[in-house]
């Protein structure tokens, strides 16, 4: 995550400003979302969905990874989405959620390959005797299923649409449910903003993916980390798009003062963000600079083009 507008930076310091441009306002600030660390370990979000919180909280995973158990009530079946860490306590909680539904796991779906979402996929698939499905063959495993963008899965008495959402990672997927809710993985977080990883992340693809999810008109966003977003999902997606545009404007404004390294840009732009997320901010910064370079607005000015660090305006 980027943790875009959380307090905690150096007192008296200010992030790079953009003359004539207002800082995007996060609509979630007024929603009364659960405070960090207070998400319930297990909760039914709707008849189709139970969320089970993994015990892996951190600055990057927020309260922990959200694992989702999805299936039609009374079907006797469910799919597990983003099993998360291969943790015995978490497995027990997911098995209890399955038992409460009177369901057996018939598939394990994974949004992307990061370990906090995918580590348990193959071992749990073996335990449940259920296939693993993902966009990455490494995640799906030798006997798994590679998911195709736009396909509709009919599982556990319901349907799940596979929505391509590359950007955070190249293999990222979201899953749209019959209820209209979308399981968005790390594409959108319940708090803060998501990292576009570098070098595999792609800001252009990420922006296109945000618009793709927006066009679905989601009834809710069930995030990979943090609380569910049900009040106005479209407004959150609008904010994410505006946030990315603002970060680009901040980079250009900072570079108008002269060439800079990525670390110098992060220190200027993310000064109000806790330092423990600066490494993640550097990833997103590099990914955004790659977009600006491709557009001819910025030039790498380092000694090695394969590992660019110093940049300047074109």
Image: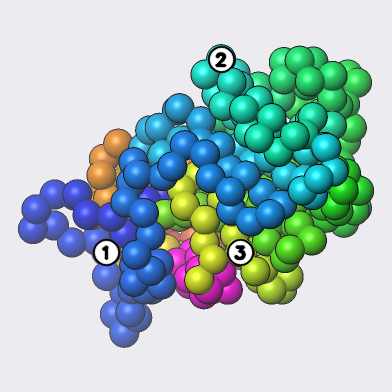
Looking at the image, tell me whether mark 2 or mark 1 is earlier in sequence order.
1
Mark 2 = which residue? 88
By secondary structure, the bulk of the magenta-drawn segment is best described as helix
For label 3, the SS is: strand
Residue, x 79% and y 20% (percent of image)? Answer: 128
Does 185 sit above or below residue 229?
above
Q: Answer left or right for 98 relative to 130.
A: left
Confirm or deny contact between disc 3 and disc 2 (CB under 8 A). Answer: no
State which region is magenta: 232-246
Mark 3 = which residue? 220
Q: Give the quadrant of residue 82.
A: top right
Q: In front here: 183 or 137?
A: 183
Residue, x 41% and y 72% (percent of image)? Answer: 27
Which callout, 2 or 1, points to the residue nearer the camera? 2
Looking at the image, tell me whether mark 3 or mark 1 is earlier in sequence order.
1
Dot 3 surroundings within 10 Å: few (below 14), some, or many (20 or more)?
Answer: many
């Amino acid at each position: 995550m980027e943790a875009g507008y959380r307090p905690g930076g150096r007192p008296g310091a200010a992030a790079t400003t953009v003359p004539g441009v207002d800082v995007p306002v996060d609509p979630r600030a007024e929603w009364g979302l659960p405070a960090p660390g207070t998400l319930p370990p297990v909760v039914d979000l709707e008849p189709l969905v139970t969320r089970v919180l993994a015990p892996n909280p951190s600055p990057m995973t927020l309260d922990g990874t959200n694992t989702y158990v999805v299936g039609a009530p009374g079907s006797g079946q469910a799919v597990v989405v983003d099993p998360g860490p291969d943790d015995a306590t978490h497995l027990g909680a997911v098995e209890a959620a399955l038992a409460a539904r009177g369901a057996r796991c018939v598939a394990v779906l994974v949004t992307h390959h990061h370990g906090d979402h995918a580590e348990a996929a193959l071992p749990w698939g073996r335990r449940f005797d259920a296939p693993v499905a993902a966009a990455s063959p490494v995640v799906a495993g030798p006997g798994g299923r590679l998911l195709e963008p736009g396909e509709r899965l009919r599982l556990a008495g319901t349907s799940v649409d596979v929505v391509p959402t590359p950007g955070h990672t190249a293999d990222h997927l979201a899953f749209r449910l019959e209820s209209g809710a979308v399981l968005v993985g790390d594409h959108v977080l319940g708090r803060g903003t998501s990292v576009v990883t570098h070098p595999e992340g792609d800001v252009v693809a990420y922006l296109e993916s945000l618009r793709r999810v927006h066009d679905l008109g989601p009834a809710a966003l069930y995030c990979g980390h943090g609380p569910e977003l049900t009040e106005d999902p479209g407004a959150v997606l609008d904010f994410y798009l505006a946030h990315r545009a603002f970060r680009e404007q901040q980079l250009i404004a900072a570079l108008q003062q002269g060439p800079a390294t990525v670390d110098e840009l992060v220190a200027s732009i993310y000064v109000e963000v806790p330092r423990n997320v600066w490494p993640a901010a550097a990833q997103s910064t590099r990914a955004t600079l790659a977009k600006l370079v491709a557009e001819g607005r910025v030039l790498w000015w380092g000694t090695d083009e394969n590992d660019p660090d110093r940049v300047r305006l074109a």
